[in-house]
Image (cartoon, rainbow, N blue to C red):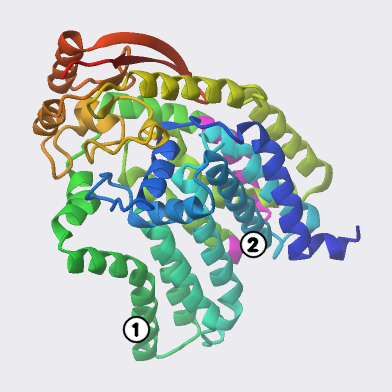
Amino acid sequence: MSNRAALHPAWLFLVLLLVAAVLRFDTFGDPNMHGDEVFYQTVGVAMHHGALPYVDVWDRKPFGLFALSWLIAAFSTSMLAYQIAAALFAGGTAWAIAMIARQWTGASGALLAGAAYLLWLAPLQGYGGQSPVFYNLFIALAALLVFRASPQLRKGQVPSSVYMAMLIAGCGITIKTTALFEACFLGLYAVWVLWRSGIGVPQLLKFAAQWAVIGAVPALIIAGSYWSMGYWAEYWQAMVAANLDKPPHWPTSLIRLKIMAIAVAPVALIALPGLAFLKPAPRAFVLAWLASALIGLFAVPNFYIHYALPLLVPLCVAASGVLARGIVGFGAIAFLAILSLTIAPLQPGHAAQSRAAIDRLELSIRTHIGKGPLLLYDAPPQLYMRTGQPFTTPLVFPTHLSHLIEKEVSHLSTLAETKRVLSLRPGAVVIAVPPRNGPINEETHQLVLAYVGSNCRLIEVVPTFERQRTDMIAIWGDCAR
């Protein structure tokens, strides 16, 4: 393949998509890889049965993430469809990184920058369909369009690609709210470059306002839709109040921050010297982009390790400065590959093992559901869909009933909702033993334990496998009405 052919966008995309597929192949078909993405996929499937996010099923994630899950579920309700979509988005983001990097590096630097992103997704828990795996593509594409438009902006010209970039970034915000900071950076960068062209202030303000409005349009459409349907209170609680009502548990958050810093360090060690090889304009662009991603990270200081995934995009762009330098670059990517497969090794048999556990849970519930509804209290949420049982509460995500930090954060009273569900006399209750997330909401936990102890029979306890943990899930069934 010639150097010119290697730089062709189509070749870059195909190669990086192949790398993404190889690195994720052992995850395909796993129905329980991580609780977050299982929940997103469950909501997407439920939406095809009429469920409305924030009303029939509650969470604080933006609507765009659930809309994307709904779209994927339109092709197939299998978790495999969600995982294939995540692989496509990961490959697409790697391609966007490569396309940005190739503006100042050769073929190898661009390709290796994209490969670095794919290699380091798994150590940051991006091996599946966490929300940054999806919204990173929107931000990376917007960044590519804005940076490409810089020469025209310096001349006082505003190409249509800048407007498209703002719309794409706005769509990214509807998938993860903290993408707002990166979207704002891209808008402010375009304003700054245009201002340096000598354009008049009135025109500059006009363009800035247009870009801000275009970026806000996706979120405004969603908010307006909930207003028109009469569900503004539920939407506001989920998007704003619930996030303010969930303060971080600082001792735990600081430990997570330390772990996150260690996990990000290998890529950062390549990215920081890589900046030295970039010219001043791209260096300033990447540094400002990284700063905006850091602001987004610290805006929600819970510091789960996958929250670092947005940092990976500008870091890999910066790393291209080193990765383009011949044998040094190949040595750096080999270092990342070995370290990645050591920290997050491929697990060829894990998907089948996980699938067997979820199948066993499903069969046990179907056999012992009794006459009442199903209650999943701190249990894999996909079991509602798999067993054909309706949601007994909008608080479907496992921590919303069982985790003390989640107490009273929705528009529903956690205690009152638990009492209401138990008053329906569930025919089966599924609960992790011990609870998976602490600190535990003892009020609801003791109520559920009292119910199953008085009304149900312990059917079995099934070891249930996620990618990085194993939980013991107890099925209490044949509950008397």
- Residue under label 2: 100
Q: Is-magenta flag for residue 278?
A: yes
Q: Is residue 272 visible?
A: yes
Q: Position of residue 108 (x, y in %)?
A: 79, 52
Residue furthest front in the image: 371
User: In the depicted view, which residue is nearer to us: 154 or 442?
Assistant: 442
Disc 1 packing (10 Å; few <14; some 14–19; many ≥20):
few
Q: Position of residue 471 (x, y in %)?
A: 42, 17
Amino acid, disc 2: Ile
Query: Could you tell whether 59 is left or right of 345 in the image?
Result: left
- Please say if 468 is above or below 153: above
**Spatial CA span between label 1 and label 2:** 27 Å
Q: Quadrant of residue 327?
A: top right
Disc 2 packing (10 Å; few <14; some 14–19; many ≥20):
many
- Residue under label 1: 205
Query: Could you tell whether 4 is left or right of 103 in the image?
Result: right
Main SS class of the magenta portion in the image:
helix
Q: Position of residue 220 (x, y in %)?
A: 29, 69
Residue furthest right in the image: 1
Amino acid, disc 1: Leu
**Quadrant (top left/top right/bottom left/bottom right) for the C terminus:** top left
Numbered badge on residue 231: none
Q: Is residue 189 visible?
A: no
- State the residue at coordinates (31%, 47%): 299
The label nearer to you, 1 versus 2, is: 2
Which type of secondary structure does the marked residue at label 2 adopt? helix
Q: Quadrant of residue 231?
A: bottom left
Query: Could you tell whether 278 is left or right of 324 in the image?
Result: left
User: In the depicted view, which residue is nearer to us: 143 or 21?
Assistant: 21
User: In the depicted view, which residue is nearer to us: 111 or 291?
Assistant: 111
Q: Position of residue 188 (x, y in %)?
A: 41, 70
Q: Is-magenta flag for residue 137?
A: no
